[in-house]
Amino acid sequence: MKKKNRLAIILILITSMMIIGVTSAWYIHELKTDFDHAAEHMYEPLSRDLDPTVKEKAPSEENTLKPISVLLLGVDQRPGEQGRSDTLVVATLNPEEKNTYLLSIPRDTLTEIEGLERSDKINHAYAYGGVDMTLDTVERYLDIPIDYYSLVNMEGFMNVVDVFGGVEIEVNQRFDYGAFSFSPGQTVMDGEEALAYTRMRKDDPDGDIGRTRRQQQVLRALIDRGTSLQTLWNLDDVFAEVAQHVRTNVPPEELYGLQQEYMAATRQVETLRLEGESKRIDGIFYYIVPEEERLRVSEALRSQLGR
């Protein structure tokens, strides 16, 4: 190859690298801008976040990130109604151990509703007192502090799944739900299918526990999609959907850093279960968790959080 030609190729390569570098920097800047707009739109602090008498969250030790807990709420909400929390999941993230625990709380779980001083299904806390009462009730039930919450309505759940290009799920049993039929095997589900997959419980031999298992499957699949390289190129669409359908008490100025700092903790996800049984009491079905089982799960979460 002539020296002149070699020089031309080298210049083309260097120029291409510079263009790629500038384009990437511009794209990352645009993504950060979209992320900041979404964070501002999503921010809805709890009453206690605005109460100056409430003790602030304990700071992390120098150069050490402390474990955190997040309450994930999926809410069915019709126009003009408060709605009920159809899905309650507690996620505890430990950045030092690089793992996350996911605990789905069956929505019919019988417990004392904080602020009402009477027992009812745990998902009714949202109907009575919104996120504040739900978070207080979950904290009391599990005997752990909840640092943050993230609420998504069901329409938003479907849209986020679609923006991610669907979720890949290993179906373990055949069943029908609404207009959808599910058969054993690996399948990619769109938002509507994934929502139907997480809602069925009457035909599941494990009832509500089977339902929570499927919810955790979809959550883990979403985490996998959200951390994959292919998602990078449509993150602006993801941010738009999230801004419209998700609410959280993570301050906008902290959300980006929190996501970056705790990403490693999502590499290993372990699911926990609350073992119990369904019982009819005064004509109403409840999910009853024995006290020793509640304490077992509480201890596992407290250990994960270093409490």
Image (cartoon, rainbow, N blue to C red):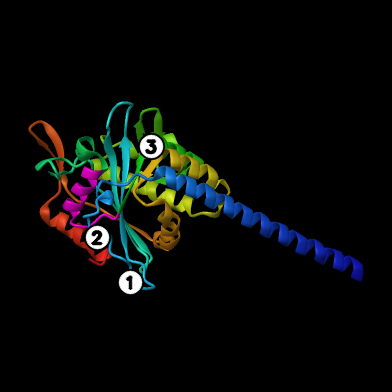
Q: Is residue 72 visible?
A: yes
Please provide percent x and percent y for residue 144.
Answer: 21, 57
Residue kind at label 1, given as amino acid type: Glu
Q: Residue at x 35, y 31 (%)?
A: 177
Q: Which residue is mark 3?
A: 195
Residues 202 and 288: in front is 288
Q: Nearer the viewer, mark 2 or mark 3?
A: 2
Report crowding for label 2: few under 14, some 14 to 19, many 20 or more residues within 10 A (C-alpha): many
Q: Which mark is residue 301?
A: 2
Residues 243 and 181: in front is 243
Report crowding for label 1: few under 14, some 14 to 19, many 20 or more residues within 10 A (C-alpha): few
Local SS, label 2: helix
Task: Kindly check if marks 2 and 1 are in contact, taking CB atoms under 8 A apart as contact.
Answer: no
Q: Residue at x 32, y 63 (%)?
A: 67
Q: Earlier in the sequence, mark 3 or mark 1?
A: 1
In the rendered image, the residue lying farthest to the front is 52
Report crowding for label 3: few under 14, some 14 to 19, many 20 or more residues within 10 A (C-alpha): some
Task: Kindly check if marks 3 and 1 are in contact, taking CB atoms under 8 A apart as contact.
Answer: no
Q: Which residue is mark 1?
A: 61
Q: Residue at x 20, y 52 (%)?
A: 139
Residue at mark 3 to residue at mark 1: CA–CA distance: 40 Å
Q: Residue at x 58, y 53 (%)?
A: 29
Which region shows up in magenta?
132-147
Q: As drawn, is 295 to the left or to the right of 303?
A: left
Residues 246 and 232: in front is 246
Q: As drawn, is 154 to the left or to the right of 122?
A: right
133 within the magenta span:
yes
Q: Which mark is residue 175?
A: none
Residue kind at label 3, given as amino acid type: Leu
